[in-house]
Amino acid sequence: MGVRSKFFDPRSVKTAARTAKGDVWHKLSPWLVVLLVAGVLVLVGVVFQSPLRKNRQLIDRKERLQKQIEQQKAISIRMEDELNALQNDPYYIERMARDILKYGRVGEVIFKFPQDLSDTGNPPDQPGAARHR
């Protein structure tokens, strides 16, 4: 019985050994799992990209505003010190009157040099004229 029947071919019968070797789905299933995991990771990245970017922008804005707050506090402290000095320190008041307002004492002669005029931006007075309180 060496003749093979065309209705029954023993090579077409699937055994456990043949199924493990030749089954297409068995070969593709690990790749399918890898692609599925990669797709989920890409989806998570796309979903969370916008909130993460917005969070970074808000953190940067908070840092900028915090620096502005510190600068304004420093300015406030300087202004409070100057106000206190103007209210309570007669030497500071005299120095401000001399430097900013160019006032002098009675009988005192104030000389104005060209660099003094360019610093303040005030028009020149008559040479040698003193201002009095």
Image (spheres, helix red, strand yellow):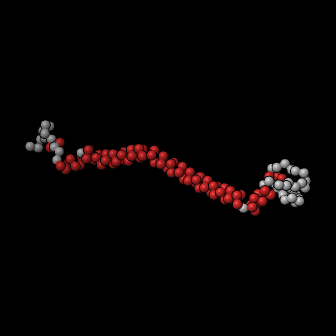
Horizontally, residue 88 falls left or right of residue 71, namely right
Left or right, 89 with respect to 22, comes to right
Residue 59 appears in the figure: yes
Residue displayed at 54% across by 49% down: 61
Across and down, in percent, residue 29 comes to: 28, 46
Residue 48 position within the rendered picture, expressed as x and y whole percent measured from the top left: 42, 46
Instruction: Please state, as top left, top right, bottom left or bottom right, where the C terminus lies in the image.
Output: bottom right
In depth, the one of 100 and 68 nearer the eye is: 100
Q: Nearer the viewer, residue 72 or 54?
A: 72
Query: How many numbered marks are there?
Result: 0
Quarter residue 92 falls in? bottom right
Between 130 and 42, the one nearer to me in the picture: 130
**Residue 82 makes an appearance in the image:** no
Identify the residue at image location x=45%, y=44%.
50
Q: Position of residue 85 (x, y in %)?
A: 70, 60
Q: Residue 6's image quarter?
A: top left
- Residue placed farthest to the left in the image? 1
Report the residue at 36% width, 45% height from top: 39
Residue drawn at the location 25% of the way across and 47% of the way down: 26
Using the image as rendered, state which of residue 129 and residue 106 is in the foreground: 106
Rendered location of residue 15, percent (x, y): 16, 47
Residue sitting at the far top: 7
Q: Pick the quarter of the image with the N terminus.
A: top left
Q: Name the side, left or right, on which 91 lies relative to 49.
A: right
Image-based side of 127 in relation to 25, left or right: right
Residue at the farthest right position: 127
